[in-house]
């Protein structure tokens, strides 16, 4: 059995440049997906925080006002 050129130089293999481009593309896709997920989470938390602040203001609003007394307090 003799060795042929096809056994040692497989043209189907990716060149280092192609591998680097594929890795770069994959890494950028992962980073973009994480950034998108982080932005969605931030928007969700912001909406919840605003909703919670509005609920806290609604609870604080019906506080009774104190009426001043008819007689001023006398000092000894």
Image (spheres, grey):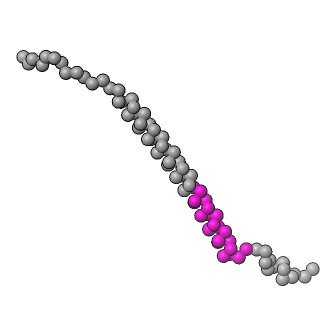
Which quadrant holds the C terminus?
top left
Residue 7: image quadrant is bottom right
Relative depth, front residue between 25 and 51: 51
Q: Which residue shows up at 30% across the image and 23% down it?
A: 64
Q: Residue furthest right?
A: 1
Relative depth, front residue between 50 and 20: 50
Q: How many marks?
A: 0
Position above or below: 1 against 66? below
Residue 51: image quadrant is top left
Relative depth, front residue between 29 and 18: 29
Magenta region: 14-34
Position above or below: 53 against 12? above
Q: Picture coordinates of residue 15 (x, y %)?
A: 71, 76
Position above or below: 9 against 51? below
Q: Picture coordinates of residue 69 (x, y %)?
A: 18, 18
Decide if residue 4 is on the left or right side of residue 74. Answer: right
Q: Which residue shows up at 50% across the image and 48% down it?
A: 43
Residue 5: image quadrant is bottom right
Decide if residue 74 is on the left or right side of residue 9. Answer: left
Q: Is residue 31 magenta?
A: yes
Q: Picture coordinates of residue 62 (x, y %)?
A: 35, 26
Which quadrant holds the N terminus?
bottom right
Q: Picture coordinates of residue 46 (x, y %)?
A: 46, 45
Q: Is residue 50 magenta?
A: no
Decide if residue 31 is on the left or right side of residue 10. Answer: left
Main secondary structure found in the magenta portion: helix
């Amino acid at each position: 059995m003799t060795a042929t050129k096809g056994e040692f130089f497989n043209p189907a293999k990716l060149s280092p440049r192609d591998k680097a481009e594929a890795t770069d593309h994959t890494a950028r896709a992962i980073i973009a997906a994480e950034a998108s997920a982080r932005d969605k989470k931030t928007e969700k938390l912001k909406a919840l925080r605003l909703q919670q602040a509005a609920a806290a203001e609604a609870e604080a609003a019906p506080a009774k006002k104190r009426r001043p007394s008819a007689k001023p307090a006398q000092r000894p």
